[in-house]
Image (spheres, rainbow, N blue to C red):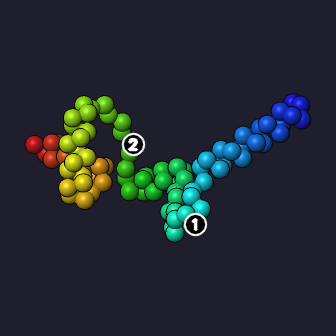
Amino acid sequence: MKKTDLEKNKALKIVEKMKKSGTPNRFSTDSATSVVDRREQRKLDQAQGLVSFPVKIKQTQVDEIRAQATAQNLSINEVVGALLEKALKA
């Protein structure tokens, strides 16, 4: 590789790191400490027994789930999990 190519690769790595880093503390009080990278989040999810399961559903159903989540002050994942448990028991 040429030296210029190596320098371009270094620059791309730096830009990627900057994109993935959190917001500095001067803009938000705890934003830098609350950012969890994907690998750590995956480990936390696995420890809780959670599995990623992509599903395609209609937009109207998504809107209803979001409305329920905001009304109950829960996350969308929790609402979907509760709905699936209820449907599977029936």
In-front residue for pair 77/66: 66
Give the number of the mark in front: 2 or 1.
1
**Number of marks in picture:** 2
| Residue highlighted by disc 1 | 25
Residue at 21% in and 37% down: 61
Real-space Cα distance between discs 2 and 1? Answer: 31 Å
Residue at 59% in and 49% down: 20
Spot the residue most to the bottom. Answer: 29
Residue at 52% in and 65% down: 28
The reply to whether the C-beta atoms of the residues labelled 2 and 1 are less than 8 Å apart is no
Numbered disc 1: secondary structure: loop
Residue at 76% in and 42% down: 11
* Horizontal arrangement in the rendering, residue 3 relative to residue 47 (left or right): right
Determine which quarter of the picture holds residue 2. top right
| Residue highlighted by disc 2 | 52
Kind of residue at badge 2: Ser
Numbered disc 2: secondary structure: loop
Q: Is residue 69 visible?
A: yes
Check the picture and name the quadrant holding the N terminus: top right
Q: Position of residue 15 (x, y in %)?
A: 68, 44
Kind of residue at badge 1: Asn
Tag shown at residue 68: none
Check the picture and name the quadrant holding the C terminus: top left
* Horizontal arrangement in the rendering, residue 3 relative to residue 14 (left or right): right
In-front residue for pair 42/21: 21
Spot the residue most to the front. Answer: 27
In-front residue for pair 10/40: 10
Q: Position of residue 86 (x, y in %)?
A: 15, 47
